[in-house]
Structure formats: C-alpha cells, structure tokens
Amino acid sequence: LTTTLLAPSTLVDITATNVTLDLNGFTVGGPHTCLANGVVTPGNTCMSGTGNPPLIYIQGRAARIYGGFVDGGGGNGIHAYFGTTDTSGGPTIEDVIVSNNRERGIILSTSGATLRNVTAVFNKDGVFAGSEALVDGVRASRNNGYGLRVGARSVVNKAVTRLNGGDGVVSGG
C-alpha cells in the first residue's frame, strides 16, 4: 500500500495464487471502534457484525500479508477461505495488528496457515487458524470471546493472551 484504505466493506479481495500484500505500515480500515469494559473487566464493547464482509478476503492460495494494520471492520478483519483441506498453500500473516473488528480479527478457515508477530485487540474474537497452523508470537487481548483458537495438529509458540472475554487459547482436536 501507499496510503491508508478506509471503507465499510471489503477493501481487498485476493483471488490469485502467490499474492503478497505489503501494508507498508498503513491501515486497511473501517469506521468501527470498540472500547474496554473497564480497567480489569475482560472483553470490550464491540457488538457482533455477523453477515458483514471482511476488510481483507483471501481466496487465493499462498497469499502473504504483512507490515500494517487492519482496523474497524464491520465483520472479520482478515478472512481466508479457499474451500480445500489440502495443507499446501495456506496463507501467511506477519507483523500485523488487527483491532476493532466486529467479528474475528483474523479467521483462517484453511489448513497450513502461518501467523507470526500478530496482535489482536478489541475484536469480537481474536485469531482463528485452522488445522496444521504454525503460530509464532501472537498476542491477543480485550477480545470479547477467545484470544487464540487453532485447529488440530497446529503448533503454537509464544502466545500471550489476557483480558479476553472467553478462553485465552483453545486447541481443536
């Protein structure tokens, strides 16, 4: 990116294979803001945005998104889905902060995703990664539901969760 992108619906739709999106320190964002429920009370004021589109939608295999912010979406911040259980070509999300999204900060409904140095704050739920994910350096706080949820056979290193309304880390079986 060379500037911040702001709108109430999907701003980036990745449909091709092997696409890299360098956010370059900028924001892909919408108009929503979520506030803390007090100093030590878990969760936030965000209400559900079910049915609203994500700010970034990944439908192409082996996409990489890095280096910026995804903030204020009416639905999910980043959503990846390409309808297969094949573990090759899962998306990579690195050095990204997702916040103030009315659904999940990040939902990777694919196998074989990689998340590195990701922060999820003030979302309905923090981060969801499907099976066989590699998660390294995720911080999740002040999300209304869970902080981090991973599917079966995933590897999680250096996850820090605090003051989420639900479980900190959930692993599927």
Image: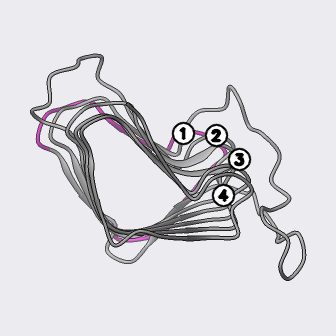
**Residue ID at (73%, 57%):** 31
Circles 1 and 4: CB atoms closer than 8 Å: no
Q: Which mark is residue 72?
A: 4
Residue 73, image x, y percentages: 64, 50
Classify residue 50 by image quadrant. top right
Whole-percent x, y for residue 3 in the image: 43, 70
On the image, the x and y values in percent for residue 90 come to: 19, 38
Give the Cα separation between the discs numbered 1 and 4: 10 Å
Neighbour tally class for label 3: few under 14, some 14-19, many 20 plus, Cα within 10 Å: many
Q: Are marks 2 and 1 in contact (CB under 8 Å)?
A: yes
Residue 54's tag is 1
Label drawn at residue 102 = 3
Crowdedness of circle 2 by 10 Å Cα count: few (<14), some, many (20+)? many
Horizontal and vertical percent position of residue 103 = 65, 43
Q: Which element is circle 2 on?
A: loop
Report the magenta residues as a range: 1-18
Q: Is residue 119 above or below residue 171?
A: below
Element assignment for label 3: loop
Q: Quadrant of the N terminus?
A: bottom left
Q: CA distance from mark 2 to mark 4?
A: 9 Å
Amino acid identity at mark 4: Gly
Instruction: Say what amino acid the circle numbered 2 marks.
Output: Gly
Q: Earlier in the sequence, mark 3 or mark 4?
A: 4
- Tag of residue 75: 2
Q: In the picture, which quadrant includes the C terminus?
A: top left
Mark positioned earlier in the residue sequence (3 or 2): 2
Amino acid type at mark 1: Pro
Q: Is residue 92 magenta?
A: no
Helix, strand or loop at mark 1 = loop
Q: Earlier in the sequence, mark 2 or mark 1?
A: 1
